[in-house]
C-alpha cells in the first residue's frame, strides 16, 4: 500500500511539469507579439518620412499625424501585451517548476521577474494589465471627436477613473511593502533570540 501511495504521490507531484506547455506557449506568443509590433514600428517610421515632404498638403499632413499617433499607441499596447505574456511565462516556471537562478543573481531582475508566490505573479500581471487598459483608453481618446457636452463629460470621467485606479494601485503597493518590512522586522529578533538560546552554557 505504501508503494502505491508513493507512486501516486510521485505522479501527482511530477504532474506540475505540464505547466511547461503553458510556459513555452506563452513565451512563443510573447516573441510573436514583439516581432509583429516591431514590424509595425518600421512601417510607422516609413510613413512618418513622408510627413516632412513639401508635396504633402496640410490635410494630408494632419491625417498622417493622426494615424501615426494612433499607431504609436497601438504599438505601446502591443509591447505591454508581450510583456504580460513574458512575465506570465517566467512566473509560471518559477512557481511550478524551478527557480531561475540567473534572475535571482541580478538586482534588476529581482524587481520584476522573481516570483515568490501566486500573489506576486498576480500583482505583476495586474500592474501591466492596468497599463494596457490605460493605453486603450488613451487610444480611444485620441480617436474621439468631441461633439457634445456629454462626450466631454465621459472623457473627463474616464480620466478621473484612470487617476483613481493608479492611486489605488500605488496605495496597495505601499501597503504591501510596509507589511513586508514589518514582517521582516519581527522575524529578525526572533531569529536572534533563537540563535542565542542555541548557544551552549559555559
Image (cartoon, rainbow, N blue to C red):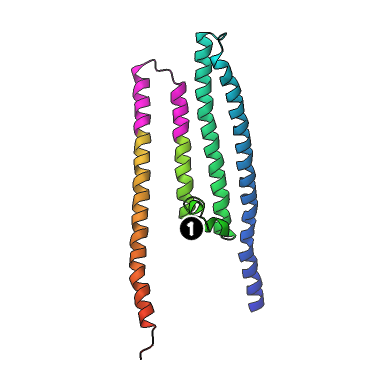
Residue 100 appearing in the image: no
- Would you say 125 lies left or right of 162 here? right
Residue 183 at x, y percent in the picture? 35, 63
Q: Is residue 15 above or below residue 190?
A: above
Residue 106 at x, y percent in the picture? 51, 55
Q: Is residue 172 above or below residue 55?
A: below
Q: Relative to the observer, which residue lies in front, 6 or 136?
A: 136
State yes or no: residue 88 in magenta: no
Q: Relative to the observer, which residue lies in front, 54 or 141?
A: 54
Hey, which quadrant is residue 3 in on the image?
bottom right
Tally of numbered tags = 1
Magenta stretch: helix, strand or loop mostly? helix
Residue 38 at x, y percent in the picture? 60, 33
Other residues around mark 1 within 10 Å, as few (<14) / some (14–19) / many (≥20): few
- Would you say 127 lies left or right of 60 here? left
Residue under the image location 63 percent in, 59 percent down:
17
Please identify the quadrant where the N terminus is shown: bottom right
Residue 157 appearing in the image: yes
Residue under the image location 37 percent in, 25 percent down:
154
Q: Is residue 117 above or below residue 141?
A: below
Label 1 secondary element? loop
Q: Is residue 46 above or below residue 25?
A: above
Residue under the image location 44 percent in, 40 percent down:
130
State yes or no: residue 152 in magenta: yes
Instruction: Report the residue marked by disc 1.
Output: 117
**The magenta stretch spans which residues?**
134-160
- Would you say 181 lies left or right of 30 here? left
Please identify the quadrant where the C terminus is shown: bottom left
Of all residues, the one furthest to the bottom in this rendering is 202
Residue 44 at x, y percent in the picture? 58, 24
Amino acid at each position: 500500500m505504501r508503494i502505491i501511495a508513493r507512486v501516486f504521490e510521485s505522479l501527482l507531484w511530477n504532474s506540475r511539469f505540464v505547466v511547461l506547455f503553458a510556459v513555452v506557449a506563452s513565451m512563443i506568443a510573447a516573441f510573436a507579439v514583439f516581432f509583429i509590433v516591431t514590424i509595425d514600428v518600421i512601417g510607422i517610421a516609413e510613413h512618418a518620412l513622408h510627413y516632412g515632404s513639401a508635396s504633402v498638403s496640410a490635410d494630408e499632413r494632419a491625417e498622417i499625424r493622426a494615424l501615426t499617433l494612433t499607431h504609436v499607441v497601438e504599438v505601446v499596447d502591443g509591447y505591454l501585451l508581450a510583456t504580460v505574456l513574458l512575465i506570465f511565462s517566467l512566473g509560471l516556471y518559477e512557481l511550478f517548476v524551478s527557480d531561475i537562478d540567473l534572475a535571482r543573481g541580478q538586482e534588476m531582475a529581482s524587481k520584476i521577474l522573481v516570483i515568490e508566490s501566486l500573489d506576486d505573479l498576480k500583482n505583476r500581471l495586474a500592474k501591466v494589465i492596468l497599463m494596457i487598459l490605460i493605453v486603450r483608453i488613451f487610444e480611444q481618446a485620441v480617436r474621439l471627436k468631441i461633439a457634445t457636452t456629454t462626450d466631454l463629460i465621459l472623457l473627463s470621467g474616464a480620466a478621473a477613473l484612470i487617476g483613481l485606479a493608479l492611486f489605488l494601485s500605488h496605495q496597495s503597493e505601499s501597503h504591501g511593502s510596509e507589511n513586508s518590512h514589518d514582517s521582516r522586522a519581527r522575524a529578525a529578533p526572533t531569529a536572534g533570540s533563537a540563535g542565542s538560546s542555541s548557544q551552549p552554557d559555559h
